[in-house]
Structures are given as C-alpha cells and as structure tokens.
Image (cartoon, rainbow, N blue to C red):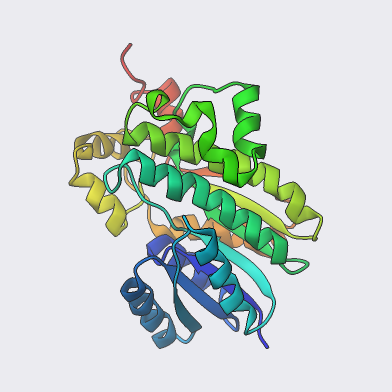
Amino acid sequence: MKEVVLWTGAGQIGMAIARRIGFGKKIMIGDKNLDNAKATTKIMIEAGFDAIPVETDISSRESILNLIAEGQKYGEITALINAAGVSPSQAPIEVILKVDLYGTAVLLEEVGKVIAPGGVGVTISSQSGHRIPELGTEIDAQLATTPTEELLNLEVLQPEKIKDSLHAYQMAKRCNVKRVMFEAIRWGEKDARINSISPGIIVTPLAIDEFNGPRGEFYKNMFANCPAGRPGTADEVANVAELLMRPQGAFITGSDFLVDGGATASYFYGSLKPVE
C-alpha cells in the first residue's frame, strides 16, 4: 500500500505541483476528459511517477466519490491537488458555478472526510476572487458555511444577480477561498491541512485560450502593467504549493496565497486601477 495523492484537473499547474510532492506515492489523475487524464498519466509515468487516470467530473458528487474510492484501493489518501475548473471564456454562467463553486466545495468536503492524519490539500483559486468588491460578512459566511447541496440556491448566486461569466467566475473563486477557511476547521479535526492559491496570469493552455478570447487584450494589458511585468509559470505556483504541502508549511492552514505578480495590488492602487 502507498500514500495516495488525488489530483483533479490534469493541466500544467496540477502537474507542476504533483511533480514536487508525488514521488513514491500513487497519484490518481482525475479529469473530466479521460483522454486528457491518460495523456497526462503517460507523461508522469515516463518521468518516473506512479500514476493512474480516472475520469472525474468535480461537478458530480458521485464522480468525486468514485475517484476517492479508486484511490483508496491503493492506500490512505494523504494529499489533494485540486486544479480542476473552467474559465470565463470556456463556459457559461451555470457551468462555472456548478464546476468551480459547487464542485470545489463538494471536493473539499468529501476529501476532508477521508484525508489521513497529517494529510494536506491545496486548491487552485484565482486572483479574480480578489477583484470583486467586498460582499460583507453575511454573504461571506453564507459562501463559507452553507451546506454544499444548498450552495447554488443562495440568493447572491441567482441568475439575476450574476452579470456575466466573468462575474460568475469571480464569485466562484471568492467562494473557494471562504470554503477553504471553513473546511480547514474540519480538516484540522483530523490533523490535516487545506489551503488555496490564487494565481494571476499563468501561461497554460487555458490561459492561452483566454489570451485569444474576447478578453485577450485585457489579460495582456494586465500582465504587461503588473509590477512583475510578465505572466507567471506553473512552476512558480508549484513553488508556493510545495511549501504549503510540506512540513515547512505545518502552521499554515485555511489560508489563500495570491501569486499574481502584483496584478491585484496594481488593480487597487496602481496603473491597472479601473477608471471610474
């Protein structure tokens, strides 16, 4: 039996993290597109890792439970890397809320029930969640603590309240951060930790879709005018994840880390500040 890593969303950021913390462990690679999971599994195996592809749709509790069950065949689940999600250019409002908001909440909940003592998780959120105005303590508490099956019924998430797919994405990512705080308490009861990372513009296939999408110029301007003056790489996100998932990060849980080259700082106090 081995320690088991559950990795959802078989993209560049998840891979960079898995390569930092996955050696000697059984890595379950969950992706809605099984061909994508298989292709990523092949890359990992050829790099010396022990990986298995599993078709996984995080918007489905049944699918998440299946991934967990598959992982438990090989040993205790000791780590979660959640990099699954859809972007504003890839999906409509309803899908973004079902996958990025509800799906992430269910995944954190279900893995939290089975995570081994000393286990650790990281979920990939986004700088977008830091861009919307403060929602207030009441709405933040709703996003954090509402039972998962009731989340999408919240008034703040109803169609008339969500302006467009970007707004849906921002709300989902704000919810992710609040949910991590809530779940950190439950994970802590099992001597386990969970944190989130909110990347800025990171060069991945998903980001390249965005560069070529309707908001492409917006994103290019963002990374050109942030303090770092460039987009980031998946490995720079993995540097932070590695700290969070190793013993050096043992006192860190329920936290969110912006890894955005200073874009959010510039959005509020610099050249990226929206013109009123």
In the rendered image, residue 201, in percent from the top left (x then y), is placed at 35, 45
What is the tally of numbered marks visible in this picture?
0
Q: Is residue 130 visible?
A: yes
Instruction: Check the picture and name the quadrant holding the C terminus.
Output: top left
Q: Is residue 59 above or below residue 178?
A: below
Farthest-out residue, top? 276
Q: In percent of the image, x 36 and y 79: which residue is there?
A: 38
Question: What residue is rendered at 42% in x and 24% in y?
Answer: 161
Give residue 205's quadrant in the image: bottom left
**In front of the other: 63 or 242:** 63
Asked whether, in this view, residue 195 is left or right of residue 8, the answer is: right
Q: Is residue 127 left or right of residue 77?
A: left
In percent of width and height, residue 109 lies at 64, 54
Q: Residue 240 at x, y = what percent?
A: 55, 55
Q: Nearer the viewer, residue 187 or 92?
A: 92
Residue drawn at x 64%, y 23% as measured from the top left: 138
Would residue 169 appear left or right of 196 to someone viewing this image?
Answer: left
Percent across and percent down for residue 5 are 59, 73
Identify which residue, 93 or 182, lies in the foreground. 93
Q: Is residue 21 visible?
A: no
Residue drawn at (37%, 46%) of the image: 95
Where's the N terminus, which quadrant?
Answer: bottom right
Residue 79 found in image quarter: bottom right
Query: Along the line of sight, which residue is nearer the eye, 103 or 76?
Result: 103
